[in-house]
Image: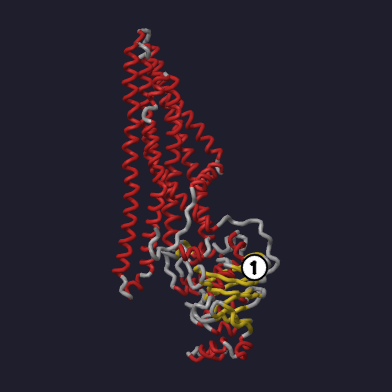
Amino acid sequence: MSRPNEPWRLPVADRATVRRAGVELIKADWRSMTLVVLLAGLAAAAGLAGPWLLGRIVTRVEAGDATMSSVDRLALGVLVCAVAQLVLTRFALNHSHRFGERALARLREEVVDRALALPARVVEQAGTGDLTTRSSMDVGTVATTLRSAIPEVFVAGMQLLFIFAATFLLHPLLGLWALVGMPFVLLVTRWYLARARAAYLVEGEAASEVAEIVAATAEGARTVEVFGLRRRRVRDADAAIGRAYGAARRTLFLRTVLFPVTEFAHSLPVAVTLFVGGHAYLDGSISLGVVVAGSLYMWQLVEPLDRVLMWVEQLQRSGAAMARIKGIGMVAGEPRSGLPAPADDRIEMRGVRYAYVDGHDVLKDVDLTVRPGERLALVGPSGAGKTTLGKLLSGADAPRTGSVEVGGVPVADLAAADELGNRVVLVTQEHHVFIGSLRDNLTMAAADADDQRLLDALAVVGADWVKDLPDGLDTQVGSGGTDLDPAQAQQLSLARVELADPHTLILDEATSLLDPTTARHAERAMAAVRADRTVIAIAHRLQTAHDADRVAVVEDGRIAELGSHDELVAADGPYAALWRSWHGRGASADEGRAG
């Protein structure tokens, strides 16, 4: 049952989806899997020869026709088979591990692609904790399975199959008694599997909740301190940790039932084979060599069964983790391909409505056309919907109803299909400096850019501080490197935009941390790179609106006014009131003269 105010969570894939995902991982590298099957089969066959040869030695010794040379030959055969099994198992595991690493690489790339394709609304509703846990902890769980669990379980499974078959061939009676422990294994495994998936999904959700609370508390530490929320945050964290502890105890209980029963079940055949085989030998129906070989086969069951049981819990945990990972794709959807090329760079919004919460539209029937090369300013009071409008124009999200198209093609579809390229770029107040060199931070926007082009882009946005860096473009920035202040990080982000060279640039208060002169210079420099570049500025300083070709005034989720600065001032409507209010609060002298 959901708790009050519980955040919305990303969905979880069903069992069929998880099975299809596993099949797809195998099909993508089926040649390697075929080689693994072949090597594991040969290793299992080699392992069967040793007990059979030992049985032959016992039979000959018992019959009295054994010679030193014949025993030596059979013993050498046992040694050769053991070495062959060791070598073949080693190569089988090696190739299986390599298969797992390649599959893991594909899975990680898929997770990143799907996470980046998530609509902003979904990320905000789900919270960072759930998405972070799925893309880190859950991927790590699947990684352990692909690297170790699946290879070892697969090889052990082949060995078990061959051992049971060899025991039946050795003597049908021993083969039947070898299965004496299987009912216990089947019953307890069925009991465990009926409960494990749900329990591990609850455990994963509880871990997401803990991660969400810890991240939110760390990010808002100053707010917690200012408003005296420390006890409340500690109480919330304690409650979340308590739920995670309870979920972990539930999965632990499942394991405490599974492991003891299965340990007993796979030890039972050894004792039964010795008991039944001994009586059959005394009755003269089975030779001593057959009893010895059968007992050794049963003893060989212990090691592969132990491996399977050791990893069965990991496989269930991994299945739940894969279901959570695949749940990301259920929201993001499959990337679209084969979209038509936009006819031109004109952006058109028609009848757009958008809601972060169902039933509460923040944009209402918005119609807007942005012409190629135009400079458009979006102004209005806080909370009017300007930032949401910018997200839809950039393709970062899609409208609830209506359409947002560039050249007749939905912008969100182009963005999700990675075909948007350099057409539309959204720059917000939040700028990230990635760990690495300054060059790495820039070339992610233009991989083929040379150093001169990188320096030119930095110069366009006024980043003169680059000259003072100790290693120039090779200077390490981000966590553990040279710290960039907020204004420098903003300039770095704008330099990326310059390198990407979009036809439409959406600035969501992107220059708010720069002084007015530098901000105005950066905006004008980027707008002047190409004559046909479109610049949409969500303005926090009305000087930006004064310099624009047109101004759209957003009020209560609607465009209340649209026109040039002079037209709107003359109309004496909402924009004129904003303009008078802005000047009345004391704009700088140069901005006042520009107005």
Closer to the camera, 486 or 442?
486
Q: Which amino acid type is shown beneath numbered disc 1?
A: Glu
Q: Quadrant of residue 415?
A: bottom right
**In screen coordinates, is 541 left or right of 302?**
right
State whether residue 163 is above or below residue 557: above
Q: Residue at x 42, y 30 (%)?
A: 160
Can residue 76 be seen here? The reply is: no
**In screen coordinates, is 517 left or right of 51?**
right
Dot 1, crowdedness within 10 Å: few (<14), some or many (≥20)?
A: many
Closer to the camera, 176 or 383?
176
Q: Residue at x 62, y 91 (%)?
A: 570
Q: In which quadrant of the rendered image does the N terminus lie? A: bottom left
Closer to the camera, 1 or 594?
1
Q: Helix or strand or loop: what does disc 1 sit on?
A: strand
State whether residue 127 is above or below residue 378: above
Please state the horizontal and vertical placement of residue 378, each as a whole percent of the image.
57, 79
